[in-house]
Amino acid sequence: MNRLAVFDCDGTLVDSQANICDAMEETFARAGLPLPGRDAVRRIVGLSLVEAVRALHPAGDPELHYAMAQDYKGCFHALRGRGLVAEPLFDGIADAIASADGDGWLLGVATGKSDRGLNLCLAHHGIADRFVTLQTADRHPSKPHPSMLIQAMADAGAVPETTVMIGDTRFDIAMAKAAGATAIGVAWGYHDADELHAEGADHVARHPADLSAILKELK
């Protein structure tokens, strides 16, 4: 069976927290609601938009949550149109991706981003062709539901025993566990190492170089 390494995007591949916080604050302002704290926003990164808005404003009704999720997309798009979206790769991630690819891992992405947002991000960094499967919130339930990971395995011809999920949040770890895959946490994103371990991470990388070493051990 093929070996598959699936990466989360925000907080794992790229540092997009400023953009996410800016767009979420504008979304809440347009709805006439108090702005969420940035720490609160960082806690929900990785969830699909409706779930993220619900977590930040649980008193709202489903219609409002859906409307705000759509508005967030517009806010983010407007930021991008003004040249204000910066999603740099974390230092060392490009090397970790190249190392995994060179070691024979098939690569994928499972993210709360939209198809459009993910494709723009990967194309900007010139790494889109590294990935054989791209799974987004446009076609799946929110993490930690295992749907994205199950489809990624089907696309790549992999099975849970030959699949790893790499992410920075407890939602990624829980999704991996639900799908029966190995869960690798990364400590440079939105949830700290202790929380990732508590969720059941099999490994936690402190730096992208550690990630390369973990994947080599799992070959």
Image (spheres, rainbow, N blue to C red):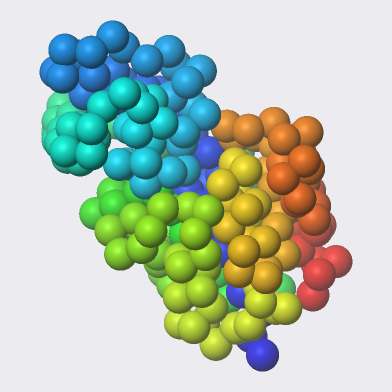
Question: Residue sitting at 15 percent across and 19 percent down?
Answer: 31
Q: Is residue 206 left or right of residue 176?
A: right
Tell me residue 30's x, y (percent). Answer: 14, 18
Which picture quadrant has residue 96? bottom right
Q: Does residue 157 appear in the picture of this structure?
A: yes
Which picture quadrant has residue 62? top left
Tell me residue 10's x, y (percent). Answer: 47, 42
Q: Does residue 118 appear in the picture of this structure?
A: no
Q: Is residue 64 left or right of residue 163?
A: left
Name the quadrant of the C terminus.
bottom right
Question: Residue sitting at 52 percent across and 53 percent down?
Answer: 144
Q: Decide which of 210, 150 is in the foreground and name it.
A: 150
Question: Residue sitting at 70 percent across and 78 percent down?
Answer: 162
Question: Residue sitting at 36 percent across and 63 percent down?
Answer: 140
Tell me residue 38's x, y (percent). Answer: 44, 16
Residue 67, placed above or below residue 216: above
Q: Is residue 6 left or right of residue 126?
A: right
Q: Decide which of 91, 166 is in the foreground and name it.
A: 166
Tell me residue 170's x, y (percent). Answer: 62, 43
Residue 105, placed above or below residue 195: below
Q: Decide which of 152, 44 is in the foreground and name it.
A: 44
Name the quadrant of the N terminus.
bottom right
